[in-house]
Amino acid sequence: MIRVIENTFVELQGGALSLNLGAVDGVYSVVVDDNVFRAVGSEFLKFVVSVDCSAIDAARFPNVSLTRNDFYFNQASATVVTSCAGLFLTENVFVNPLATRDYVVRVPYEHSSTMFARLNYWNASTYDEIAERVYDYSDDEFLALVQVSPWYIDLNRTQTASGGNRFFKGPFEIGGLLESDVTLSSTEQPYRVTQNIFVPHGRTLVIEAGVTLLFIRGGITVEGEC
């Protein structure tokens, strides 16, 4: 077991914590709990915390817990980045306006279709705002989908909200109400439309050049932009 508990990382120009689990034999559990990461990073830093399982066989991914950590005013491309399918992110506080994203997953969809990041505070109140802080299946169809609902809407972590984007039904399967702006960009294989696509006012669906839609059921109804 690896435990990183009750530490304070403050004003570090490099990353605060990098765990390469493929370099350690026999690690089946990792706990990163109750730490404070404040003012870590710089303009060109890639991450504040990295948990890397890329060198581990998918069947042997360890259980990784990031719980009750406070991330304040850090600056990097990603506050937390992971390639570990077994990582569970919960009860954390993210207030990092200078970070590009707060959570970036590098887990292939084939290894894990869903990553769980429920009950965190993202310095946001709506699903769309949180989606801008997370890089996952919605940005790259070959990655796992991050489940962020429900989430906290206050720093004290007492009040919650819930919601989600139900437009993505599965790998390369789409349909239904567009609840946030979506760009379809993959040309590797067709998107299967299994329910009528509805683009309401205020939402934008971008279908990039070379993308193929295979309509199994329904069509596209546009009130917004497409």
Image: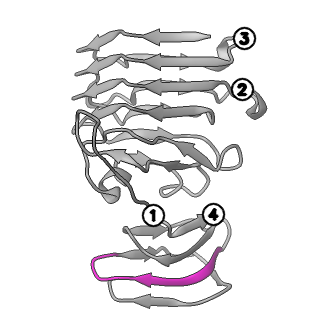
- Residue 63 image position (x, y, % from top left): 63, 26
Task: Name the front one of labels 4 and 3.
Answer: 4
Task: Return the disc, 3 or 2, that comes first in the chain's sequence.
Answer: 3
Residue 176 versus residue 9 in the image, above or below: below
Task: Tell whether position 193 is magenta.
Answer: yes
- Disc 2 from disc 1: Cα separation: 31 Å
Residue positioned 21% across, 39% down in the render: 97
Task: Name the front one of labels 2 and 4.
Answer: 4
Q: Which mark is residue 170?
A: 4
Q: Residue 56 carries which label?
A: 2
Task: Return the disc, 2 or 4, that comes first in the chain's sequence.
Answer: 2
Q: Do the residues labelled 2 and 1 touch (CB within 8 Å)?
A: no
Residue 157 or residue 191, whichever sits in front: 157
Q: Which mark is residue 25?
A: 3
Task: Give left or right: position of 102 versus 12.
Answer: right
User: Which of the 4 image quarters holds residue 47?
Assistant: top left
- Disc 1 from disc 3: Cα separation: 38 Å
Element at badge 2?
loop
Q: What stretch is highlighted in magenta?
A: 191-203
Q: Main secondary structure of the magenta part?
A: strand
- Disc 4 from disc 3: Cα separation: 34 Å
Q: How crowded is mark 4: few (under 14 residues within 10 Å), some or many (20 or more)?
A: some
Amino acid of disc 4: Gly
Amino acid of disc 2: Ile
User: Which of the 4 image quarters holds residue 153?
Assistant: top left
